[in-house]
Image (spheres, grey):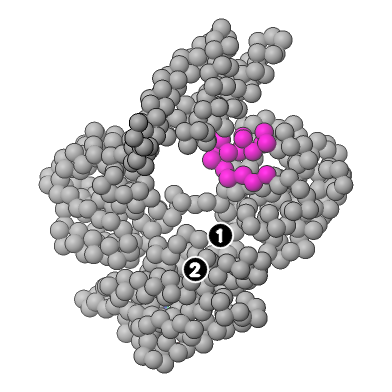
Amino acid sequence: MPNKSLADIQQAMQQLQENFLRKLETHADILRGINKQLQNEDISSLNELINLSHQLAGSCGTFQLADAGYLARQLEVVAIQLQQSASVDTRLIHLVSDAISHFTDEVDLRLLKNNSVASMSEIGSPYQQKQLIWLALEDQILCTELMAQLSAFGYQVVSFDSFGAVQIALLKSVPGLLFCSAELKGESLLLQNQLLQYVSEQQCKLMIFSIEDFFELRVAAVRINAAGFFVSPLDVPSILHRISKLFDDSYITDKKVAILDDDLLLAEHYSWVLKSAGIDVLLVKEPEQIISELQNFSPDLLLLDMHMPGYSGSDISGVIRQYDSLSSLHITFLSAEHDIKQQLQAMSFGADDFITKPISNENLITSVRLTLARNKEIKSLIERDSLTGLIKHSAIKEAVARQYDLFKRSTDQFCVAMLDLDHFKNINDSYGHAMGDVVISTIATLLKKRLRRSDRAGRYGGEEFLIVLPNCKLQHAEEALNTILRAFREIHFSAGKSQFSCTFSAGVVSSELEYADAEDMIKAADEALYQAKKLGRDQIFSN
Ligand SMILES: Nc1nc2c(ncn2[C@@H]2O[C@H](COP(=O)(O)OP(=O)(O)OP(=O)(O)O)[C@@H](O)[C@H]2O)c(=O)[nH]1
């Protein structure tokens, strides 16, 4: 038999994957059937459930459905617990029923994604799909202006001239956002039931533009889940800001949890439970490795066992707090300790709160989610600048210091850039301070949109921004900044009847030059910025 080509193998694997997904759909249906029985406290299919979840736990991971695999394993564990319970335990039945729902929800999501990826092949990866915006606007001049501006921000924009055209297109692909007029060609958006149903089923965001503004219309927008309601005349920078925030929010990744517990089985159990809720988890196995593991993983929360052989939770949290880069990490003690006195004493070593063991899966997820959400809010209030939404002076300097520390250990090259708007005083003087604020907010939005997700940008001063680009060579940092500069030049600001555009200068340096410390690198980036200004502004200068 002749050797199979790579393409043949890929095709065969693709076929296998598709077969598995089809089978998975059938399995999910069987599980839903069993779930209905359970809801009537009928446990006659428990054996079938255990066998099926066992089989799925083993197979899902092989077919790139690791999350579904975790959920199936978890389902198996609780189903066995139910089987072993002496009497019919309704609490356990609920746990099993929830575990089935988690699993089938995950499968539904994966099947949906798989379909949309296949039908979106002409557009690109799912990530690009999320950057796709569809406009269906009555006002063609506004539509053209918005298309130009959104393209400058790197979005793919497609325009439609009727609700019918949008509805047909939705059968083939799904944008990240649909921005449309409340009234288009004499038709009301609110009456487009099928279109609105597609939009909600496909989890596409919807924003509405309306000539009229009255309370009932706004309520109707809320009821169809619109993520924004804009009235004429449209303030373009403000909608750009909102769109960018909308896309940003769906990528929010403040959901990383590290766990250190000497009971590995328990730690793995927590890990499964949290992963099933979409949380990234790192299991730290050796207490001595915790600092480097935390620095590499950068979790938002550490779940820390209180009693371990060799060290107590207080020992570990005390050491963690000796590191500036970990000083704001939220530490939650996991402990079977019920004595409040002991708990409070342990907290004086730098932990933030307690979870008392044993804790149910649901309570663990809820507690971790609440902590992550609260931390994110507090962090945002403390660290973020209200005009730009970027991190503030001290936080961005801290980000440079953190990257510098990592560089010292891993030698992964990184770059630092200082960026300053050109002749910004003239903009304030000519168009007013409020317009100046719009320009500052726009460059910030552009930075958030155009930099990689791993890059950090912060507002260093009034119209000055500091950027850290990890794992980046000088040439790539220059290219990235030049792309941003070109896009920024294209943005037109409207001030009354006049329009203007703005430029910036930036200095960029690479860790390759071996600076003494992070402060030294920032200073060098500032000097490079000075050179860019001296050479005539509107350019990037690198050292
Ligand atoms: N609107 C607005 N203006 C600000 C803010 N922070 C600082 N500025 C103004 O930014 C201007 C900065 O001006 P300069 O430092 O002289 O620099 P420039 O005019 O940008 O000139 P070059 O940097 O040399 O190109 C000052 O007029 C500040 O008042 C802010 O938050 N909002």
Which quarter is ligand 1 in?
A: bottom left
Q: Is residue 234 left or right of residue 319?
A: left
| Residue furthest bottom in the image | 534
Question: In the figure, residue 25 lies in which quadrant?
Answer: top left
Q: How many marks?
A: 2
Does the magenta-highlighted stretch encompass residue 7? no
Mark found first going from the N terminus, 1 or 2: 1
Q: Nearer the viewer, mark 1 or mark 2?
A: 2
Vertical position of residue 168 compared to residue 460: above or below = above
Q: Secondary structure at mark 1?
A: helix
Question: Which residue shows up at 65% across the image and 78% down it?
Answer: 517
| Residue furthest left in the image | 185
State the residue position of label 1: 380
Question: In the figure, residue 2 lies in which quadrant?
Answer: top left
Question: In the figure, residue 395 lies in which quadrant?
Answer: bottom right
Chain part drawn in magenta: 268-283
State the residue position of label 2: 472
In front of the other: 543 or 154: 543
* Residue 257 picture location, percent across and down: 63, 47
Vertical position of residue 77 compared to residue 61: above or below = above
**Residue type of the residue flagged with mark 2:** Cys
Between the residue at mark 1 and the residue at mark 2, the CA separation in whole angstroms equals: 26 Å
Q: Is residue 494 left or right of residue 424?
A: left
Question: Which residue shows up at 74% across the image and 37% down it?
Answer: 264
